[in-house]
Image (tube, grey):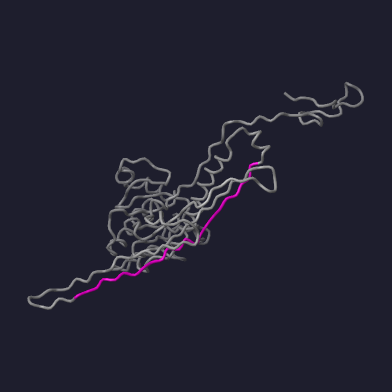
Amino acid sequence: MAVTVGSPYSGSSASPAYSGAAAAGTFIPEIWSGKLIEKFYSATVLAAIANTDYEGEIKAMGDKVKIRTKPTITIRTYTTDQQLVVERPSSSTIELNISNAYYFNEVLDDVMELQAYLNLLSMWADDAAEQLKITIDTAVLATLTGAMNASNFGTTAGKISGNIDLGTSGNPAVLTPSTVLNYIVDMGTVLDEQNIPETGRWLVIPPWAAAMVKKSDLRNASISGDGSSMLRNGRLGMIDRFTLFASNLLPTASEGSATAFNIFAGHPHGLTFASQISKVETLRSEQTFGTLLRGLQVYGNQILDGIALTQLYAVRG
């Protein structure tokens, strides 16, 4: 109900100078609902596809984690009465630099807080955490493009065969419901030829490719055949030893009028990722009557072993 503040009329009482709900001098009360519109987030996959063993060792931006790699032991032929060769295994180190960071900084005005009657700061913190995951996933996945072993991507992939076509710029693979499974198997073969363990393998595909898999000949067999429900990280199920994840965050490129996607597969040993929300704090704003909520998340990522990752460059057919 509108409450009239002063008379909106001039002249005759039968002739209003203003009309309508927004007439001058009319106060319209606003009612803040305690119900919020649900927000849906992109699925994040880094925690599922990367090695996160070193996450607990970082505290702030600028930290460095030195990771020792496993040495390769030489196997030699033995003959009777021969003198044994003594080997001193040594391993190189890989440095994981925590050199990247993102932040958020929001203000909740005191007036807004009184009117809303909602715990807005808590809601904003939850949303910020999800947005940070999405931003960091996107940034890290982009660094994988072409960063694996040279035998694991392109039109001549395969360490042994050298004739597996996984697409390249200007000549992308074309995924259709009838070809998508062939390309998944080819990516598995590339990892097989590098002697990558079968247990723990993962594959990240765009949602439209996931739909093709579901419509393929294996829709009632391997996919989602493990009895697990789809989680917030986009997990779909297993196929050809890969745990499949669907994600909208894969890097893309233009191929004429089409969009090409960099589709990645591998083993967690190939990629390490470490992240830490180093600061979340509230403080009074100096510029307005309100409370600031700000946070800082730091992270680093490093390819530990390029032979444990493979890439398919493909367009939708």
Image position, residue 19 (x, y; %): 81, 28
Q: Give the range drawn in magenta.
A: 86-108
Image location of residue 10, percent across then percent down:
90, 27
Left or right of 18 in this view: 88: left
Quarter-of-image position of residue 64: bottom left
Magenta stretch: helix, strand or loop mostly: strand
* Screen quadrant of the N terminus: top right
Left or right, residue 87 beside residue 207: left
Residue 52 inside the magenta-drawn segment: no
Give the residue drawn at x 18%, y 76%: 85
Residue 106, above or below 259: above
Quarter assignment of residue 163: bottom left
Furthest toward the right, the residue is 11
Total tally of numbered discs in the picture:
0
Compared to residue 194, the image places residue 217 above or below, namely above
Q: Position of residue 295 (x, y in %)?
A: 55, 50
Q: Residue at x 59, y 34 (%)?
A: 118
Q: In this view, does 263 lie above or below 124?
A: below
The answer to whether residue 98 is magenta is yes
